[in-house]
Image (cartoon, helix red, strand yellow):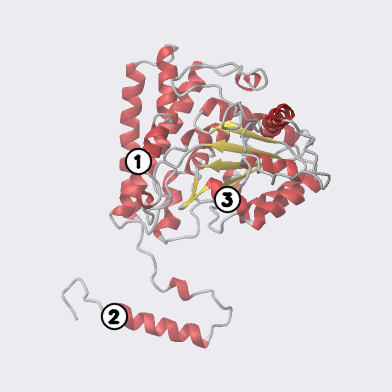
């Protein structure tokens, strides 16, 4: 199933043709008008003009918190209970609280860098809760919500950003791979793993997360090719947060990202990335396709990065407040809260208790990070070459001299 694009494109103007050498103008003004009207109608049909300016997207919960019907995807959330809905809300709130604490810790010098997921909680929690325990996840470096769903302790995510390890968890313990910093490479890793799943005769599925910027990488295109040719049981989950650092999506692709799947021979679908129910439903559908031997699917979660790309980025240099404010009105957490309240699925006691739990999580994360050891300043020189190297030795000595030039805590030189 592919949701067809309704995005309008302005047709190119063709140069007018002059009358033939006979000097006879065979086209009357009436005929010209009819021809122009016919061309305009054809252009509208070809481009979808006259319809919505954006492609259709799967949505089950509006920004106002109203439940809307969807004939194709309602069945994937038909059994969801009030407890389940409160659980999804709790997941998003605690993930956001952890993310905010990590951002603060970086600002305080406790972390070297942090990549915030602010605004993308619904895409991550919805898709993460659609997974089975035996499914395998290949994340980028921003999937803190998916890590939460897979049972990875939030404090384990921070060791790499503090520089004390290369990832603080066993990937096979939660079927959640270590964070991938190289943009787009995890799509190939996921495809290869999924091909192995098929050879093993297992019925599990694989999911690869990446952003709109990574969709322009060659690794992702190669992963699409291999997964399609080998019918690999993999779901490509693209969180289109509108900005690849400072580059907007429209400068990366002439078509909506989910439509790229068509060129590789498998389905693509765009989902409202701020609707946790829609993300849950669409991801369940895509995973079931994969497990049934129907091959890969591309899911484009249309969402927004409300914060900076990372803590080293300043988004005010390339985007305006109006855009951010418009997306804040579609906040995924507020959306679900409105639905819970209108459906009488949660009371003030629930929200107050969750607030207390949220603050406790922030405190635990803060204390855990500050208890971590300082990174080894010389670790960067280890394991570059198996037998050592003269240039690395020279660089190590230069760095040691530089470190020694600073005053120590006791007032030394």
Q: Position of residue 410 (x, y in %)?
A: 17, 73
Residue 404 is marked as 2
Picture coordinates of residue 211 (x, y %)?
55, 47
Q: Position of residue 304 (x, y in %)?
A: 47, 39
- Residue at left 57%, top 32%? 54
Q: Nearer the viewer, mark 2 or mark 1?
A: 1
In the picture, residue 36 is in which quadrant?
top right
**Left or right position of 249 against 222:** left
- Look at the image and tell me in which quarter the C terminus lies: bottom left
SS of the residue under disc 1:
helix
Residue carrying label 1: 321
Give the class, few, some or many, for how many residues have Cα within 10 Å of label 3's Cα (few <14, many ≥20). some
Q: Which residue is mark 3?
A: 252
Quarter the N terminus occupies: top right
Number of marks drawn: 3
Q: Give me the C-alpha separation between circle 2 and circle 1.
A: 45 Å
Q: Look at the numbered disc 3 and give the secondary structure of its residue.
A: loop
Dot 2 or dot 1: first in sequence order is 1
Please identify, in this view, whether the residue under mark 3 or under mark 2 is nearer the observer: 3
User: 387 above or below 148?
Assistant: below
Query: In the rendered image, which quarter is residue 44 located in?
Result: top right
Name the residue located 63 percent from the left edge and 37 percent from the top edge: 299
């Amino acid at each position: 199933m592919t949701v067809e694009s309704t995005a309008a494109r302005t047709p190119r103007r063709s140069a007018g043709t002059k009358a033939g050498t006979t000097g006879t103008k065979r086209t009357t003004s009436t005929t010209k008008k009819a021809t122009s009207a016919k061309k305009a109608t054809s252009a509208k049909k070809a481009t979808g003009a006259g319809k919505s300016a954006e492609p259709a997207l799967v949505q089950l919960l509006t920004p106002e918190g109203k439940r809307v019907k969807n004939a194709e995807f309602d069945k994937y959330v038909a059994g969801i209970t009030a407890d389940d809905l409160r659980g999804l809300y709790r997941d998003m709130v605690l993930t956001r609280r952890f993310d905010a604490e990590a951002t603060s810790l970086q600002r305080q010098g406790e972390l070297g860098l942090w990549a915030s997921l602010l605004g993308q909680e619904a895409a991550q929690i919805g898709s993460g809760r659609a997974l089975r325990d035996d499914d395998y996840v290949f994340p980028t470096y921003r999937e803190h919500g998916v890590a939460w769903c897979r049972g990875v302790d939030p404090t384990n995510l921070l060791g790499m950003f503090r520089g004390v390890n290369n990832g603080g968890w066993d990937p096979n313990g939660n079927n959640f791979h270590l964070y991938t910093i190289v943009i787009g490479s995890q799509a190939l890793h996921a495809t290869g793993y999924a091909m192995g799943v098929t050879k093993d005769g297992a019925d599990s599925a694989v999911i690869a997360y990446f952003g709109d910027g990574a969709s322009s990488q060659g690794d992702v295109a190669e992963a699409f090719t291999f997964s399609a040719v080998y019918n690999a049981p993999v779901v490509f989950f693209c969180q289109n947060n509108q900005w690849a650092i400072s580059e907007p999506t429209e400068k990366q692709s002439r078509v909506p990202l989910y439509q790229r799947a068509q060129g590789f021979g498998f389905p693509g679908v765009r989902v409202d990335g701020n609707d946790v129910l829609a993300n849950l439903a669409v991801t369940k559908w895509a995973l079931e396709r994969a497990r049934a031997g129907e091959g890969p699917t591309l899911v484009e979660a249309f969402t927004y990065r409300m914060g900076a790309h990372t803590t080293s980025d300043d988004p005010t240099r390339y985007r305006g407040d109006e855009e951010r404010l418009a997306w804040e009105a579609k906040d995924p957490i507020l959306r679900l809260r409105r639905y819970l309240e209108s459906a009488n699925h949660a009371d003030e006691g629930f929200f107050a208790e969750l607030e207390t739990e949220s603050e406790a999580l922030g405190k635990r994360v803060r204390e855990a990070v500050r208890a971590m050891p300082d990174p080894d300043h010389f670790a960067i020189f280890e394991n570059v070459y198996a037998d050592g190297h003269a240039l690395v030795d020279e660089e190590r000595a230069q760095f040691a001299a530089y470190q020694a030039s600073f005053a120590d805590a006791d007032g030394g030189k």
